[in-house]
Amino acid sequence: MMKVMLVDDEPFIMQGLEVLIDWNALGYEIVKMASNGGEAYEYLKSEQVDMVISDISMPVMTGLDLLKRIREEGLSDAYFVILSGYNDFKYAQQAIRYASMDYLLKPIDREELTDILKRAARMRESEHDETGMTAVLRALRTFRSDQDIKTYGDEINVPQGRIMLLKEQLDSLIAAVEQNDITEINRSVDVLYDETRDRGMSTDVFDLNLNYLLFRLIHLAVEQDESVDQEEVLSYISDNVYESGEIRGSRTHLKRFAISYAEYLVQLRKNVSRGILQEIEHEIRANFADNLTLKDLSRKYYVNSSYLGQLFKKKYDQSFKDYLCSVRISEAASMLLKTDEKIPVIAEKVGYKDTDYFIQKFIELKGCTPAKYRRNSGLE
């Protein structure tokens, strides 16, 4: 069960949240109901939770102050959802800045909150050593430069009162990407960069805008295919944001990336409906002895190689390379039992020119050498 803490100074709001969702059915347990940010902060000093759902306006400590404090102090990496009665994006800007997962307006919509809880559960399952927000910022820094990143707060250091989110321009670009409208993508990027220049926007503030863009694009992919998780999309972004001779974060770079991402979304739509893996499985089993590569298959079937690799990992719990190896070794095992051909010949027929390497892979998968495998069958 994922542990969740509700924070609101109005008891009836918390009681409403408690009965609004079937928490247990979604894999959650409410472990704490705090009446303000200060009480929640003290609780997090000694206890860990997986999610905090907090009102924005409270006495003692606001929801944003709580979020800011636990992020800056490294007190909790819990997913954080801000609840607000204010439809003012300056609050959402601050929430984004300190790694809030989402920002919901009151009254809370049951389906919207349910979707967030399901998404958080998927993200938690896929996480390993870094938080979702750190991964997003890693993608952002990959987009901007070769530098590594440490924490969200280290990277996005925007002076208070000077946050400037070009939401209208960014939303136009996001819509163009979703519609795969190349002409509109190019126009929207030009408008975004012209506005950035005209306002004299600093690099840090522009990074905040790119961060917002990446968040929205990630959500587009997840909405397209529920089986896609954040790490898959980040992997795509990391693999497709750089081209030799191109300045990262430049106008040309963003255009290329946005057009590429639009095509990625098209691929997601196609792959969901046509089952691309089935076609590629047939290809591998028919041509396993050839020098098959993920890049060649992705090119042949018009699928992004990073996305194809993730499909293999998801379905078979192994990489494409390991899957191909298992097909080859299975075929070799069949040939050992059905023919009297020499082991080096069989190795070459299944795609291995190096017999020693073939024997090594055979032992890994079958637990014995090819010769012993054949002897155990009674053929020698």
Image (tube, grey):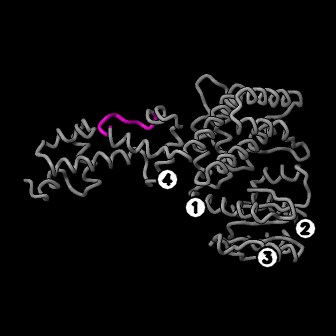
3 or 1: tag closer to the N-terminus: 3
Judge by depth and name the residue closer to the eye, 309 or 59. 309
283 displayed left or right of 223: left
2 or 1: tag closer to the N-terminus: 2
Judge by depth and name the residue closer to the eye, 69 or 16. 16
User: Distance of mark 1 from mark 4, alpha carbons?
Assistant: 13 Å
User: Distance of mark 2 from mark 1, alpha carbons?
Assistant: 32 Å
225 displayed left or right of 164: left
Can residue 177 be found in the magenta stretch? no
- Per the image, label 4 sits on a secondary structure element best described as helix
Query: Residue beneath label 3, please?
Result: 33
Query: Residue beneath label 2, please?
Result: 58
Query: Residue beneath label 1, please?
Result: 125
User: Distance of mark 4 from mark 3, alpha carbons?
Assistant: 37 Å
1 or 4: tag closer to the N-terminus: 1
Mark 2 burial class by Cα count in 10 Å: few <14, some 14-19, many 20+: some
Give the percent coordinates (x, y) of residue 178. 70, 39
User: Distance of mark 3 from mark 1, alpha carbons?
Assistant: 25 Å
The amino acid type found where label 3 is placed reads Met
Tell me which segment is drawn in magenta: 287-295
- Per the image, label 2 sits on a secondary structure element best described as loop
Query: Residue beneath label 4, please?
Result: 314
The amino acid type found where label 2 is placed reads Met
2 or 4: tag closer to the N-terminus: 2
- Per the image, label 1 sits on a secondary structure element best described as helix
Can residue 290 be found in the magenta stretch? yes
Judge by depth and name the residue closer to the eye, 244 or 371. 371
